[in-house]
Image (tube, grey):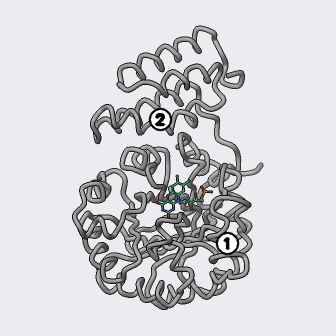
């Protein structure tokens, strides 16, 4: 008779970054205005192995700007966690890395992949893909300035005619980077088109440091495929986790057993949504917390019976009590209709 699968029998990858060691690592991607402390904690509770802050402006950190400094706050339970910084000025980035280090992350990540115009215009983010020697010297300068490991998150290249990721990866390894995360698109693509994972095995051949795959991983099955098809050292998930932190639990289950985990029930989805919002309230003033939370409802309520009216209502509320009342009533409604989750 077949033995049930165990995690050891399905060891697809080991990832080590400094003191952080994870097997079959599934990581939460840095996302501006999304991966704040409450969301990172929720994803960690659901099984994310490593979480990242949203990118933080090096200028803001060095100027001691309140909004940037606020983003450095970490919770004990979210470790291992990385703080990501961005900027185009080498000296400011060095200084910012030292400020970030003092918040106690497990490593520092440098953003060399952000495609948006106002970041690129400051020679930061993906603009560094136009100058690989500068990307490498910035990385080396930061590696030399902090005691923590330093990693880099980047893209394949600037555009389809300049896919330089193998060369970039080799330069970053030489500069002392402890790992590289590759969003498998070019800067020109933004978020359009498909991520091309076929570059990952080529990057793996070019360097010894861990290579983390990112881009278009939207289900537990795709996490498994990513490990199997590319030999990556870990998988990073962004958009598919927004309002769906369950994806980390599902991925763990899939990697350990090769089968789909049971879906979260409607009640678990809604209660997790409320727990997440409560965590927001513990960090921010109520109105701001409730308004900033609006981006998460679509994910938490996706696929639930009669959810669109509920979504419309909660999108308009400005107090927690209103949201809580509406969602508790919704749970009652779903129970009273004795809806099975597969019907909901
Ligand atoms: C709303 C949003 C904000 C993002 N902010 C950041 C960021 O701060 N730093 C970063 O390196 N990438 C950022 N990204 C890119 C993601 O980390 C990730 O590379 C990209 O979404 C592709 O992964 P996915 O297909 O799993 O979403 C952001 C993406 C989104 C959608």
Which element type, helix, strand or loop, lies under badge 2?
helix
Residue furthest right as drawn: 1
Residue 122 sits in quarter? bottom left
Label ID, residue 231: 1
> Which residue is painted at 43% across and 43% down in the image?
42
Q: Which quadrant of the rendered structure holds the C terminus?
A: top right
- Rendered view: 107 above or below 305: below
Q: Which circle, 1 or 2, is nearer the viewer? A: 2
- What percent of the width, then of the height, locates residue 31? 48, 55
What residue is pinned by disc 2? Answer: 294
> Which residue is painted at 29% across and 40% down in the image?
284
Label 1 crowd bin: few (<14), some (14–19), many (20+), radius 10 Å: some
Question: Marks 1 and 2, how far apart in space?
Answer: 37 Å
- What percent of the width, then of the height, locates residue 218? 66, 50
- What percent of the width, then of the height, locates residue 174? 49, 91
> Which residue is painted at 36% across and 65% down in the image?
57
Which element type, helix, strand or loop, lies under badge 1?
loop
Q: Is mark 2 within 8 Å of ligand 1?
A: no
- Rendered view: 263 above or below 114: above
> Which residue is painted at 70% across and 64% down in the image?
195
Q: In the rendered structure, are the residues bearing label 1 and label 2 in contact, judged by CB atoms less than 8 Å apart?
A: no
- What percent of the width, then of the height, locates residue 94? 31, 80
**Mark closer to the chain start, 1 or 2:** 1
Q: Nearer the viewer, residue 19 or 244?
A: 244
């Amino acid at each position: 008779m077949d033995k049930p699968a165990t995690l050891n029998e399905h060891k697809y990858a080991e990832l080590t970054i400094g003191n952080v060691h994870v097997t079959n690592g599934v990581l939460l991607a840095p996302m501006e205005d999304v991966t704040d402390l409450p969301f990172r904690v929720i994803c960690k509770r659901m099984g994310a192995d490593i979480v990242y802050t949203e990118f933080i402006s090096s200028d803001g950190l060095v100027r001691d700007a309140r909004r940037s400094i606020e983003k450095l706050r970490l919770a004990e339970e979210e470790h291992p966690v990385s703080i990501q910084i961005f900027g185009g000025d080498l000296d400011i980035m060095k200084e910012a890395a030292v400020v970030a280090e003092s918040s106690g992350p497990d490593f520092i990540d440098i953003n060399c992949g952000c495609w948006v115009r106002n970041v690129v215009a400051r020679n930061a983010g993906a603009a560094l893909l136009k100058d690989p020697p500068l990307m490498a010297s910035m990385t080396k300068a930061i590696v030399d300035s902090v005691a923590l490991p330093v990693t880099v998150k980047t893209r394949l290249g600037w555009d389809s005619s300049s896919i330089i990721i193998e060369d970039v990866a080799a330069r970053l390894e030489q500069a002392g980077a402890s790992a590289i995360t590759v969003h498998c698109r070019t800067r020109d693509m933004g978020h359009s088109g498909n991520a091309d994972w076929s570059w990952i095995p080529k990057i793996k051949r070019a360097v010894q440091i861990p290579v983390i795959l990112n881009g278009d991983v939207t289900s537990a099955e795709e996490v498994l495929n990513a490990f199997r098809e590319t030999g990556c050292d870990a998988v990073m998930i962004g958009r598919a986790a927004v309002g769906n932190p369950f994806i980390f639990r599902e991925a763990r289950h899939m990697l350990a057993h090769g089968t789909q985990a049971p879906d979260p029930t409607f009640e678990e989805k809604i209660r997790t949504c409320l727990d997440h919002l409560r965590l927001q309230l513990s960090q921010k003033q109520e109105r701001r917390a409730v308004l900033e939370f609006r981006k998460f409802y679509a994910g938490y309520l996706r696929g639930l019976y009669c959810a669109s009216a509920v979504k419309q209502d909660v999108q308009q509320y400005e107090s927690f009590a209103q949201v809580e009342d509406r969602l508790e009533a919704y749970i009652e409604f779903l129970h009273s209709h004795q809806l099975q989750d597969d019907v909901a």
